[in-house]
Image (spheres, rainbow, N blue to C red):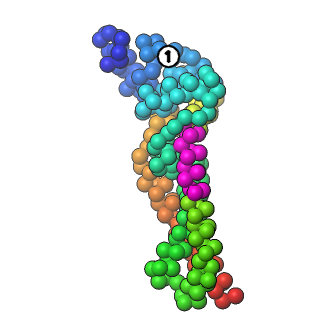
């Protein structure tokens, strides 16, 4: 029950919340559900976000009011590609998956060398350039942490813009002023199955990178 709202008032909004409008859809919470957030109302954004609105709506409101782009999203810091995929931001999910594989290349080379999957000539080339590879490994390690930090600081702003863009698109193609809840639910909210999909995509990138590394080392070893 929302603090400050009577039992009858809470029941009157119960049906609205079940349609994905979250908990910030009435004035009792201090938010105006019809406030324009930049092309979509607060109520519409709450419908789009669907889950965890108690966290996102105040953050989005602050971003709109003071123009801030920075906040902290711990989930995105720990699992960036999982976060973006779960929230259906596929472009960002795939970009990070690709970048994370690139950052792991130097470490992957050393792991593969120690596991004995390379030929003797390839191993000789690796050990001759071990200092360079270890330096790259250190740089990529710091690059990975910096990328995670930047994404976690801007993830909520990225999601806010993603919500606005999609809501505007839905409105543009809508024949009436009211949003189609089925379309909003399909485009917004979360989809945990996407985590499995992005994992498979990342593994595919890793496999391709391993094949590429092997081919590169084979060429360099005989050069």
Residue toward you, 113 or 90: 113
Where residue 118 sits: x, y (%)?
A: 52, 84
- x and y percent of residue 192 in the render? 41, 46
- Occupied quadrant, residue 132: bottom right
Q: Residue at x 61, y 68 (%)?
A: 135
Name the residue carrying label 1. Answer: 31
Residue 188, compared with residue 223, is above or below; it is above
Up the image or down, 90 lies above or below 171; here it is below
Front position in the image: 48 or 97:
97
Q: Is residue 141 left or right of residue 11?
A: right
Q: Residue furthest left?
A: 7
Query: Taken as a whole, is the magenta stretch helix, strand or loop?
Result: helix
Residue 6 lies in the magenta-colored region: no
* Image quadrant where residue 7 sits: top left
Residue numbers of the magenta segment: 142-156
Q: Quadrant of the N terminus?
A: top left
Residue farthest to the right, as pictured: 223
- Give the image location of residue 93, x and y in percent: 54, 50
In this rendering, is residue 205 above or below 96?
Answer: below
Query: Can see residue 171?
Result: no
Residue 144 belongs to magenta span:
yes
């Amino acid at each position: 029950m929302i603090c400050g709202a009577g039992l009858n008032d809470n029941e009157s909004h119960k049906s609205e919340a079940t349609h994905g409008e979250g908990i910030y859809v009435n004035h009792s919470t201090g938010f105006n559900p019809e406030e324009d957030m930049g092309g979509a109302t607060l109520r519409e954004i709450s419908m789009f976000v669907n889950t965890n609105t108690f966290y996102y709506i105040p953050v989005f409101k602050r971003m709109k009011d003071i123009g801030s782009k920075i906040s902290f999203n711990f989930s995105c810091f720990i699992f960036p590609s999982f976060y973006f995929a779960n929230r259906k931001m596929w472009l960002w999910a795939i970009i990070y998956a690709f970048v994370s594989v690139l950052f792991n290349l130097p470490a992957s080379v050393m792991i593969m060398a120690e596991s004995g999957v390379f030929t003797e000539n390839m191993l000789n080339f690796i050990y001759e350039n071990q200092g360079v590879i270890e330096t790259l490994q250190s740089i990529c390690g710091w690059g990975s942490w910096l990328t995670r930090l930047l994404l976690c600081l801007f993830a909520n702003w990225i999601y806010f813009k993603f919500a606005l863009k999609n809501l505007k698109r839905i409105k543009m193609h809508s024949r009436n002023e009211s949003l189609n809840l089925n379309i909003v639910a399909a485009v917004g909210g979360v989809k945990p199955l996407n985590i499995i999909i992005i994992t498979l995509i990342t593994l595919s990138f890793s496999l391709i990178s391993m094949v590429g590394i092997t081919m590169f080392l084979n060429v360099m070893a005989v050069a």
